[in-house]
Amino acid sequence: MRFLPVNLNAVLVELDDLAQTLALLASLRAEPIAGIEELVPAARTILITFRPAALSAAALAHAVRQRKLDARETRVDKRIEIPVRYDGEDIAEVAGLLGITPDELVRRHTGSDYTVAFTGFAPGFAYLSGGHPSLNVPRRAVPRTRIPAGAVGLAGSFSGVYPQASPGGWQIIGVTDTPMWDLSRETPALLQPGDTVRFVDATALKVALPVLEKVVAAPAPVAVEGGCAFEVRAAGLQALWQDGGRHGQARQGVSASGAMDQRSLQAANRLVGNASDMACLELAYGGLQFVCRGDAVMAVTGADGPVTLTRADGAQWPLPRYQPVALADGDTVSFGEPVAGIRSYLAVRGGFAVTPVLGSWATDTLARIGPPAVVAGDVLPMRAVAIGAVVGTAEAPPTDLPTVHEEVVLDIVLGPRTDWFTADAVERLCSQPWVVTPQSNRVGIRLNGEAPLVRANTAELPSEGTARGSIQVPPSGQPVLFLADHPLTGGYPVIASVATHHLDRAGQIPVNARVRFQPMAGLHRVHGPIEL
């Protein structure tokens, strides 16, 4: 096995095949190594996230190398049948690639049992292995911008079902109405690693299977009688509930999400006496306006921009950031456009009374999991203040928030797939500036450079786990920097990752800013695999 660096808190273990991957995964789950936080298995790799304070990368590699690759995960046998109408838009093309008829393709696809090898890409998306050996086809050269929910597809030797409408590059051969993800179930993901799956041909039924568009969101907050609340007059560009993240859900294909700037979220909570990972409002580019009903204490952190208080009698003055502020009944608070950074965090003493989803208040915009975005007209109730919740003293705001007026430098760790690129491409990654495009969001920052990054290895990369901060390079050669709502797995090579200490800064970079990547000292080999 090889150990490839992903970040200062993550490594990618590369094995020979899927069988070895599942064996190592079973061993690590049966006898956990102290300090490991998350395991994301894929076709031939396991992405391991760990706590550097408890376990070094070298110690982790040494401990994993001692594991035998003959373990098998024990679980209750579960067999699931999935009816499919085989009229997908790629079925004729896929049959042609394989030199068979569409009818023969259906016969082969329904003639074998599959096993859920691992999950990823989206909540409830399972990679199914063990089908007919001839069903091995490449992804589409140009991914579709939208594949409907319930679409059944092929990629490499895997089959899969899209739980919700999303972009994707799999070859679509059919559709099913069996929901892959449903929060009303005790276990939302229908397919779990180790399950047995059988596809059943429902084409002859001639029944139009519905397109599934289930939005997996929690109910909006409900006002608490007699309590304090904020009445939202305007929500701005984007106002989302966020917290420390939804950790420990990788087995269902769910990534952590959470605040884009974790330090700012924690500071806002400390200032009002809350636990540091409680729910806050994350505001992109300002624009929020609300009226306070009752008395409250709030704090605002993150981006640097004007916050104005207008009293019920019309008196008005600016509010400080990074300080607790007392609000009276009838006060109106307005957020202007930031001059540095783009995301602000609003916390209230006692916390907001918002319903968690899968144990977290984080809203994942890619997976569509979590409380709905705040909109004008919403009433945001607050929880009762806990005994002992002490309002904190003022904290120092950051001095290096990104702006469009100066180059933003981000430290990076090269790997795990640096050797898939030419030496010139690796040099170019770090030498030329990259402009943040308007297509950027919480999923990732799309970058544009004068010269694209050229791959030395043009083979198709089997899907593997991706981490927050990963710099993935699609066929265009223009990189994408994954942020909080990134997919759990990806199929394009990751040339490097933004170092953990600069992830919060990356979450504050505005559109049209220029970014330059700087390899960390001692981790700057230009070419070739970098192993632990």
Image (cartoon, helix red, strand yellow):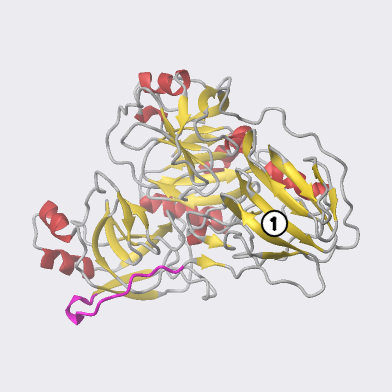
Up-down relation of residue 97 to residue 101 (above or below):
above
Q: Quadrant of residue 317?
A: top right
In the picture provided, is 504 more to the left or to the right than 479?
Answer: right
In the picture provided, is 97 more to the left or to the right than 249?
Answer: left
Residue matched to label 1: 279
Up-down relation of residue 63 to residue 333 (above or below):
above
User: Residue 312's x, y, as percent?
Assistant: 82, 56
**Residue 66, can we see it?**
no
Is disc 1 surrounded by few (<14), some (14 to 19) or many (20+) residues within 10 Å? many
Magenta-drawn segment? 201-214
User: Residue 32's x, y, as percent?
Assistant: 60, 53
Does the magenta segment cover residue 213?
yes
- The amino acid type, in three-letter code, at marker 1 is Ala
Does the magenta segment cover residue 338?
no
**Residue at figure coordinates x 87%, y 46% from the top left:** 392
Question: Helix, strand, or loop for circle 1?
Answer: loop
Up-down relation of residue 286 to residue 253 (above or below):
above
